[in-house]
Amino acid sequence: MMRTRRFVGRRWTARFLLGVVATGCGGERWPSPPPVDATTYQREHEVWLAGERAYLSEVLPIAGIWPIGDGETAFGADPALPVPLPAAGVASHAGTFLRAGDTVTVIPAQAGVLRLEDGSPIDGETEVKRVLAGPYRLEVTGAGDHRRWVSAIDTSHPAISAPPPLGSYPLDEQWRVAARFDEFDSPRVLQVPDVRGGTMKVRAVGQLIFRLKGEEYRLTAIGPRLAAWFKDPTNGSTTYRGYRTVRPTLDGVAVDSSVVEDGQWLVLDFNFSYNPPCAYSTFTTCPLPPPENRLPVAIEAGLQKLPSVEGY
């Protein structure tokens, strides 16, 4: 489950650029990110937090996830089926997913029990990624490998219209730092574990080097959407016990690795650290961060955990 995010900030100033040059020559000072207007910064953070809360309406309604193997996978209200969907409006046997290699089709058990997203009925075997069965929207998903799952989203879930409040640390500019992107000579393919008990391949493109409270740290950055998944001592107490994600920005916008050069200075703002979907639902397919992305310093910034759910 991916999201498109826009991050806020300010353009590099001439003073900042001169600071980078001085740092490169003398090696004594670390540059500071360009300044921000406090009122604007606070408002931008509030808008971001509202967007994160809205994201709960997409994740909390996920009611289940089941693997789809080769051959037939039946679904319906019957609890004995491989994909049980006990709810009013779902037929005892609503249909069957049929998988042949990477292709997944759906076959309705009878006319009228399954619908497309536009409401039109599915009358025969159809290759679709989303199917409506009663109150559920069934989505076929993958993880970039041979595995396939079907997720059930309860379209009547109360979080869709009224997501619960989502906590965040108070906005604090000490967690907004300059980070140098040190690009790898060539991208490294990492095999990282995922929450479904398997592994996923991710593309590590470089490291983000930054300083907090006078100490230097680094995080391996994943591409092409430049991001760093990190763990820290707040996990399990005030923040989600798994990990969080921070995306570096350039001119106020999160960037892809294709537009960032080796040695370029970016802004790394931990005030905008966000949770992965597995913080809110066990019915997800999140990859886990590489082991080197465990920070020894408590990052008391960004999103906190949602107490009403367990997550992974």
Image: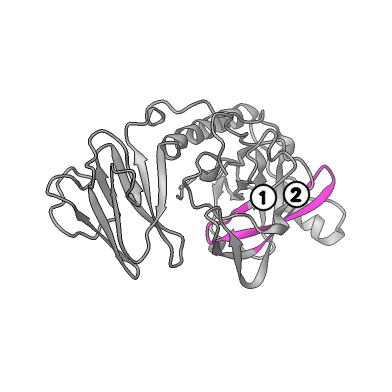
Q: Report whether 117 appears left or right of 288.
A: left
Query: What x and y, as percent, mark residue 200?
Result: 54, 63
Q: Which residue is mark 1?
A: 230
* Secondary element at image label 2: loop
Query: What x and y, as percent, mark residue 226?
Result: 57, 56
Image mark for residue 295 = 2
Front residue (pair 140, 168): 140
Q: Quadrant of the C terminus?
A: top right
Answer above or below: position of 298 versus 264: above
Q: Are marks 2 and 1 in contact (CB under 8 Å)?
A: yes
Answer above or below: position of 198 versus 240: below
Instruction: Inspect the image, locate mark 1, and give the three-letter code of the amino acid beneath it.
Output: Phe
Query: What x and y, as percent, mark residue 303?
Result: 61, 35
The residue segment tinted magenta is 206-228
Observer able to see residue 126: yes
Real-space Cα distance between discs 2 and 1?
Answer: 7 Å
Q: Residues within 10 Å of mark 1 (few under 14, many from 20)?
A: many
| Image point (77%, 53%), residue name | 217
| Image point (87%, 59%), residue name | 26
